[in-house]
Amino acid sequence: QTMASFQSVVVVAVAAIVATAAHAADTDNCGGECVPGNAEFCGLDNQCHIYSCQAWYEFGPRNYTGYDGVSPTPLTCQDIQVT
């Protein structure tokens, strides 16, 4: 249950921060090649990634996602209800 709770928090956190962190991520080290209008962001690996739960978890800002590249916690992405 703890793992499921953590995963749910990550999914909700991703949804909540994408809008606010997108600009910061897009202006990082990808040389302006990522196109925010095409739902792309500049990842920590300095590559453009299409916004998805898995991509944001792995390549988004670690202070938001909590991803640990040495021993990553498996992530189960689920759609959230529109409110």
Image (cartoon, grey):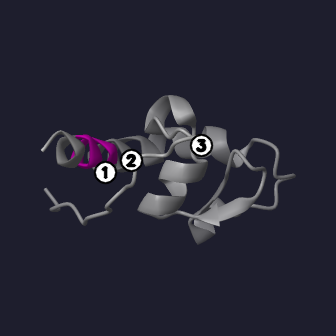
Residue 8 falls within the magenta-colored stretch = yes
Task: Specify the segment rendered in magenta.
Answer: 6-10
The picture places residue 73, in percent across and down from the top left corner, at 41, 46
Check disc 1 and report its element: helix, strand or loop. Answer: helix
Split into 4 quadrants, where in the image is the N terminus? Answer: top left
Disc 1 residue crowd, few under 14, some 14–19, many 20+, Cα 10 Å: many
The picture places residue 63, in percent across and down from the top left corner, at 51, 28
What amino acid is found at the position of numbered circle 1 in the picture? Answer: Val
Residue at 72% x, 61% y: name it: 48
Residue at 82% x, 44% y: name it: 29
Front: mark 1 or 3: 3
Disc 2 residue crowd, few under 14, some 14–19, many 20+, Cα 10 Å: many
Check disc 3 and report its element: helix, strand or loop. Answer: loop
What amino acid is found at the position of numbered circle 2 in the picture? Answer: Val
Q: Relative to residue 73, is residue 37 drawn left or right?
A: right
Q: Indicate which disc residue 11 carries.
A: 1
Front: mark 2 or 3: 3
Dots 2, 1 in contact, CB < 8 A: yes
